[in-house]
Image (cartoon, coloured by chain):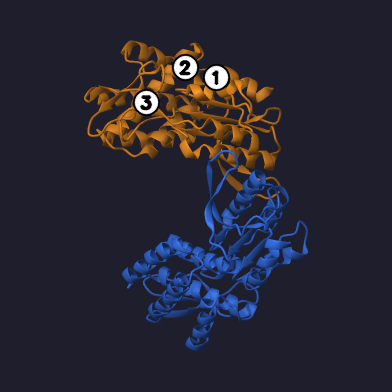
Chain colours: A orange, B blue
Amino acid sequence: VPQHLSQQYGRLKAVASQDLGGSAVARLVSEMALHARQILGRTDRVQLTSRVVGKHYFGFRGEAQSRPINQALYVDSEDVLNRLLRAFRSGFRSGTAEDIVRSAYTTAYSVFAANDVYGVGRKASATFFEILIGHVVARVVGVSPRKKVRIPESGADLPTDYVFDPGPNSRKIHLPIKTSTRERAVQAWVHQLVLDRIFGTGVYRGVLVVAAETKRDSRTAEVIEICVPRQLQMFQSRVAEISRIYYLDPPQVYMALANDFPRVEVKSFGEALEELQALLHT
Amino acid sequence: VPQHLSQQYGRLKAVASQDLGGSAVARLVSEMALHARQILGRTDRVQLTSRVVGKHYFGFRGEAQSRPINQALYVDSEDVLNRLLRAFRSGFRSGTAEDIVRSAYTTAYSVFAANDVYGVGRKASATFFEILIGHVVARVVGVSPRKKVRIPESGADLPTDYVFDPGPNSRKIHLPIKTSTRERAVQAWVHQLVLDRIFGTGVYRGVLVVAAETKRDSRTAEVIEICVPRQLQMFQSRVAEISRIYYLDPPQVYMALANDFPRVEVKSFGEALEELQALLHT
């Protein structure tokens, strides 16, 4: 079974590098989610104790135990999931913000959990998530991203996270994607600073997409959320400006930063699709 | 024999992490250079065709062939080398700029070549070089470097190349160290930009140290130098300011940038020791 998973993973990377926003990526992502759920059907589901106020988490236990999964965001019903995956494959032309985030969350966490229970490395989950989110954004923006920028007048390329450039009359999108940030959050701001300096402030809009900040406490096995709101505020005021941070499972303490100062606009990923056009053109 | 090399390498990393400027590092570096020369004594020395004007290169051939070595900078005589290694272990309290660079060059390229002929990965050579140069600079500056900086008011750490902070009344040194830059040169400027933005321009002086830009052309086997002078000038004017670039084997086309505009001060590493004090205090 893990053999099959890793074959699909290899195919996904190949297909995504050809045309990230293409329907072949959507089909393969859907297949991988359904296949992951078959794998998870043969594992035990365990309820977890949550220290995150107002949120409930469970996990899957196979050879190893999965990361925590948010009960309210993970779709159990096959019928509902099939409907959501159809919406996903159609580029979410219909569907509410809640549909979008539950579809992306269930897809991502099915594959994360299947990888976790078979001890597949975290790199595979991170790459899957990057392709899933990159695909959704590529369809909305209407162009394929690149993973490097050409430094003007030098001919030199700088490696980047995904960058989307719809053309000369549009802003561009800088899209770092992470399953969680922890101590690596600063990287998104540092990369944004470099783009601001090389191309001018406001040319690239920074949009950071993160799955969640939850983890199981290694001592107590309870689900906790690791958040550093003052760090994000300092990065925002001292390093560079990130326009949006979208979470699949947004921490409450980060959502509150959207009403604080220095402002960090943290929202649910469900709102991203509507807002991206505005970010590009205003 | 490679077993012994890798044991020394592991010890060097451990000792360097304790006290980079300490005499134990100098002793171990000297031992590794002499040991590498024993290994190289059992290989063939081959003359190489040089396309680099005015410079002559040779290589060692064992199981594999070494990178090119500059004849004028590599010391053959055991007596001369022993004198230079004594000067190195004393922190170059005496010795000309030429002594300094030939000592560092011979030490570095003995170990690089021994690694090359036994197919030891380039990472080991890069780490050895970083410790060798870091040690010399740590003795001159008088403090141990760190490999991260604390972002003010956030409590967050940012990983960096070596940074030296002699105290509140002094500038600080940001010291990226590379065996060659190629397409990775921009990294030094990007890291400098981040330090300038977070701490203010002029707080950290950027000092990039590079061994050489030579390589063997894979088609013709001739020695060539890969230089991108206009790229360095654009990085210097558009990304951040690097105060000095010191080479063990400086490319002529880069030395010429010290008299051009945008200015990039490229010099021989032999001059670094005298200049570092001035960089810290003026």
The residues bearing labels 2 and 3 have C-alpha atoms spaced at a distance of 14 Å
Reading the image, the residue beneath label 2 is A100
Q: Mark 1 lies on which chain?
A: A
Q: Secondary structure beneath disc 3?
A: helix
**On the image, which quarter does residue A58 sit in?**
top left
Picture coordinates of residue B92, whole percent (x, y): 58, 77
Q: Is A43 or B144 nearer to us in this picture?
A: B144
Picture coordinates of residue B137, whole percent (x, y): 58, 66
Residue found 54% across the figure and 40% down from its top = B155
Quadrant of image for the C terminus of chain B? bottom right
Q: Is A103 or A92 nearer to us in this picture?
A: A103
Eye-nearest disc, 3 or 1: 3
Q: Earlier in the sequence, mark 3 or mark 1?
A: 3
Reading the image, the residue beneath label 1 is A273
Q: Earlier in the sequence, mark 2 or mark 3?
A: 2
**On the image, which quarter does residue A127 sit in?**
top left
Reading the image, the residue beneath label 3 is A109
User: Label 2 crowding class (10 Å Cα cut-off): few <14, some 14-19, many 20+?
Assistant: many
Picture coordinates of residue A71, whole percent (x, y): 35, 17
Residue B106 appears in view: yes
Q: Secondary structure beneath disc 1?
A: helix
Q: Is A62 located above or below residue B247 in the figure?
A: above
Q: Is B131 located above or below residue A211 in the figure?
A: below
Residue found 43% across the figure and 79% down from its top = B34
Q: Is B99 located above or below residue A101 in the figure?
A: below
Quadrant of image for the N terminus of chain B? bottom left
The residues bearing labels 3 and 1 have C-alpha atoms spaced at a distance of 20 Å
Label 2 amino acid?
Ile
Q: Which chain carries label 3?
A: A
Q: Pointer 3 and pointer 1: residues touching (CB < 8 Å)?
A: no
